């Protein structure tokens, strides 16, 4: 009788161990192929477009018409983009210093990438010029360092 009980206990313990091991193995076995099938795609939700400058020009190809010493007026994105703050733009009523701080950060990112035809602009005076050589030189109107500007 004692032997019978001992055998039952052993069988129960072995069964429990087998079930635990099976459970541990099965999630891995199922996950591995699924991971391979589904690549980690990240879709950017609308409204989260990030900008690399605060101003734009009204028309395409302005840089091709401009003479190297000419300045063109630009339009501030934060005044024409609803919910622009969600995309990293300063609020429409931001002060000049706040606007410049954001533009400076964006310019540093843009300066780290070589983009052909980039020029310079002042996010406070809203003027742009085609000469990238003027980068970080004083704005002719306010004296703040000029930032990197893309035309398209
Ligand atoms: Zn300026």
Image: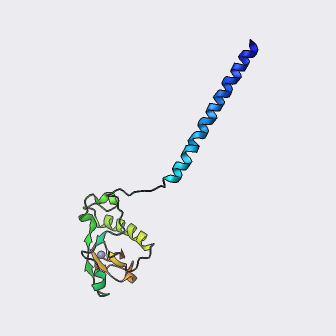
Which residue is drawn at the image coordinates 35% and 66% (left, top)? 51
Q: How is the image coloured?
A: rainbow
Left or right: 111 as drawn, with respect to 75: right
In the orientation shown, which residue stands out farthest toward the top? 1
Which residue is drawn at the image coordinates 26% and 80% (left, top)? 72
In the orientation shown, which residue stands out farthest toward the right? 3
- Give residue 90's quadrant in the image: bottom left
Which residue is drawn at the image coordinates 32% and 78% (left, top)? 139
Which residue is drawn at the image coordinates 38% and 68% (left, top)? 106
Name the spot of residue 79 as percent of width and height, x first.
24, 64
Vertical side of 133 occupied by 80: above or below: above
Left or right: 39 as drawn, with respect to 133: right
Left or right: 3 as drawn, with respect to 60: right
In the rendered image, the quadrant that contains the C terminus is bottom left
In the rendered image, the quadrant that contains the N terminus is top right
Name the spot of residue 24 as percent of width and height, x first.
60, 38
- Give residue 103's quadrant in the image: bottom left
Ligand 1's quadrant: bottom left
Between 95 and 13, which is closer to the camera in this rendering? 13
Between 51 and 41, which is closer to the camera in this rendering? 41
Name the spot of residue 43 as percent of width and height, x first.
39, 57
Between 79 and 66, which is closer to the camera in this rendering? 66
Left or right: 24 as drawn, with respect to 124: right
Total marks placed: 0
- Give residue 64's quadrant in the image: bottom left
Name the spot of residue 125 as percent of width and height, x first.
27, 74
């Amino acid at each position: 009788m004692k032997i019978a009980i001992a055998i039952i206990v052993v069988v129960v313990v072995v069964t429990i161990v087998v079930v635990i091991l099976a459970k541990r193995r099965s999630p891995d076995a199922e996950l591995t192929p699924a991971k391979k099938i589904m690549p980690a795609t990240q879709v950017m939700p609308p409204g989260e477009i990030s900008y690399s400058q605060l101003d734009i020009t009204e028309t395409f190809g302005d840089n091709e018409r401009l003479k190297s010493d000419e300045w063109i007026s630009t339009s501030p994105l934060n005044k024409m983009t609803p919910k622009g703050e969600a995309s990293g733009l300063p609020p429409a009523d931001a002060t000049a210093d706040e606007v410049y701080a954001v533009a400076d950060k964006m310019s540093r990112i843009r300066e780290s990438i070589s983009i052909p035809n980039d020029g310079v602009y002042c996010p406070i005076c809203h003027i742009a010029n085609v000469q990238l050589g003027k980068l970080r030189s004083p704005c002719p109107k306010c004296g703040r360092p000029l930032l990197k500007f893309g035309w398209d």
